[in-house]
Image (cartoon, coloured by chain):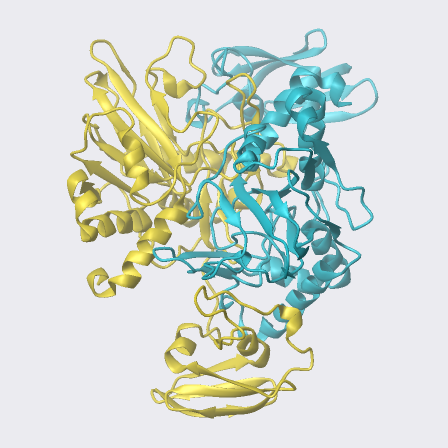
Chain colours: A yellow, B cyan
Amino acid sequence: MLRQVTHTDRIVTLDYANGATARFHAVWLRDNALDPTTRAPGNGQRLITIGDIPAGLSIGAAALAGDALSVTFLPENKTVTFPADWLAAHAYDRDHDHPIGWTAPGITTWESAIAAPGGDWTAVHTNPAAKRDWLAAVAEFGFARLTGGPAEPGALLKVADLFGYVRETNYGRYFEVRTEVNPTNLAYTGLGLQAHTDNPYRDPVPTLQILYCLENSAEGGDSIVVDGFRAAERLRDANPEGFALLAGYPARFEYRGSDGVCLRARRPMIELSPDGQLVAIRFNNRSSAPFVDIPFDKMEAYYAAYRQLAEFIDDPAMGVAFKLEPGESFIVDNTRVLHARTGYSGAGSRWLQGCYADKDGLLSTLAAMEATAPEAAE
Amino acid sequence: MLRQVTHTDRIVTLDYANGATARFHAVWLRDNALDPTTRAPGNGQRLITIGDIPAGLSIGAAALAGDALSVTFLPENKTVTFPADWLAAHAYDRDHDHPIGWTAPGITTWESAIAAPGGDWTAVHTNPAAKRDWLAAVAEFGFARLTGGPAEPGALLKVADLFGYVRETNYGRYFEVRTEVNPTNLAYTGLGLQAHTDNPYRDPVPTLQILYCLENSAEGGDSIVVDGFRAAERLRDANPEGFALLAGYPARFEYRGSDGVCLRARRPMIELSPDGQLVAIRFNNRSSAPFVDIPFDKMEAYYAAYRQLAEFIDDPAMGVAFKLEPGESFIVDNTRVLHARTGYSGAGSRWLQGCYADKDGLLSTLAAMEATAPEAAE
């Protein structure tokens, strides 16, 4: 509840009934005005550019208008109102300090003791609340299982249809993960694969991956997922200088396993936002190219940090292991959660299908569901 | 030409005939060994993990072996060779200092005087050298025109087929850019659009966009492209503190113009690699959300930098303008080059189709073409 409004020509100060205060600058308020000549009714897009705001902008008046702020901007002599709750939700006059490697609100990092989140095929296809919970698990934990689906080739595309769009690549709209005679990728062998993120040699990396099981009677071939954000937190706490090296210099990744394909990326193993938020993990022993962007005097410390990060990733206390049955699948946030498999061989068969998709579609679908049924999201 | 090799237990030092030297660490050499038990013959993927390298690794011997380096690692007692030219290409014992906002090798920034790069539809579909030159222009300049194509709906997908894969989104595999009665996006009106990158509210953003003209008899509706990297360089040179603010704090972007869609991103307007390389520009007046991640005391300077960046972007000395004819299209690197259009109205019609794709496919196709016909790429 707004109690009082004061202003200078450049700044409006709001006093709330609970004793809190929040200041807003004239240019910020003008740029974010909610009136229909600033924001298009209907699609909500901004109709003005920063250049449309007069350089000599000032605040001519600011006053309470019910539980809203009314501001008159000069020289336009334009008056607009901002609801108090909108201002509270967009306040920036606050502490912006974060510990390095902080995670976004809504992210929960985990180790092996987590109860693996999952959903049921029929439920997520028929019950919006079940679908929303399954999507919310991917947003919060970076992975979720899905059980009870059909053991049919191509069924993984129906998983992507639940929330968004497949990212087609040189591997196809989807790809077959099974032993091949002349594998273009070590994934297409019976070898165990260390926990990794997929396609770090691609920029942008696919931000989601779906792995769907059609056959899995082979000995071995278990799936393991590991929270790369948690591994990064452990590295940060144990070796902050090493964390800073992996975040502070680009690694290199490369894939040239198929004719006509030569994919290369130059990105750090630990990607941070400019204000230190964990944004992405890239980790893949198979496709790491020679690292050539780290100064000579820091290379040994960089490698020591890489080794230590790998130890956290390989630590059995970190991973959640399960064996996919036909019709089961899992989805991972490929910017965060690593996946591994144990080796397999001998009798029986193992056949998975995989595809990529992107997080923007998943998070958009989730946000739209939560916006239309917010009470159910409590 | 290698002249001499010396070593300690941790470091190999190479002396070249031309007087240059390069040092390599034991762990780096071991990790990047090229032998068939370290790298899989065929697909080239690494077969070992960092944890497979003994923590007590040391160099037992290092010697010239023709124009190659032979190294014996202990305690494995494993000897591998590295060609001299491979070592020279991957040397990291060099100066790693860069000016802030440096651009990757092969990038050329430009202003309006550039001769707009382009290709001919028939040539790029039939002549590999023409296709390679067209792809190389996109890599170097961030945009290229394509003329002489069919004025057929869906033809833009054949442009994407030249190098990679469409990124499907909530806008479809492709979308119609023409005036609509109830536009879900201001692009679907006759309004002029300030130069912008598309979909900054998406994470990852689509890294390529194709805009293909089917009809353009309306008055106005010209296309303009602007090099965002050049605009960032101009800001850096004119106002380094302002550049650091736009690179140092995340902006926010949002789109909620359609039912069931709620896309949000928290990324900086100027994205740098950890070592200061220009990686991406995000700039879009229509979909900028309130910026709430900049400290109060820096908000006015942040806005001043935003205004100054916009002035460079809007500067007529920066943009390349052209009017698309039916059957003509252009492609932009959406992480770098902004596109604008002038308003249109009145008699005639304007109908474009647009789609998104990703740079990894384009750069991979280009690299593979250059690898198979390197002499032609001179």
Residue sticking out furthest to the front: B347
Residue B112, given in percent of the width and then of the height, sits at 79, 51
Above-or-below relation of B309 to A305: below
Residue drawn at x 51%, y 48% is B176
Above-or-below relation of B297 to A229: below
- Would you identify the image quadrant in which residue B366 lies? top right
Quadrant where the C terminus of chain B is found in the figure: top right
Q: Is residue A319 visible?
A: no
Residue A259, given in percent of the width and then of the height, sits at 54, 16
Residue drawn at x 57%, y 11% is B80
**Residue sitting nearer the eye, B251 or B325:** B325
**Residue sitting nearer the eye, B244 or A65:** A65
Residue A243, given in percent of the width and then of the height, sits at 48, 45
Residue drawn at x 37%, y 91% is A66
Residue drawn at x 50%, y 50% is A272
- Would you identify the image quadrant in which residue A338 lies? top left
Q: Is residue A181 left or right of residue B186?
A: left
Q: Is residue A180 visible?
A: yes
Quadrant where the N terminus of chain B is found in the figure: top right
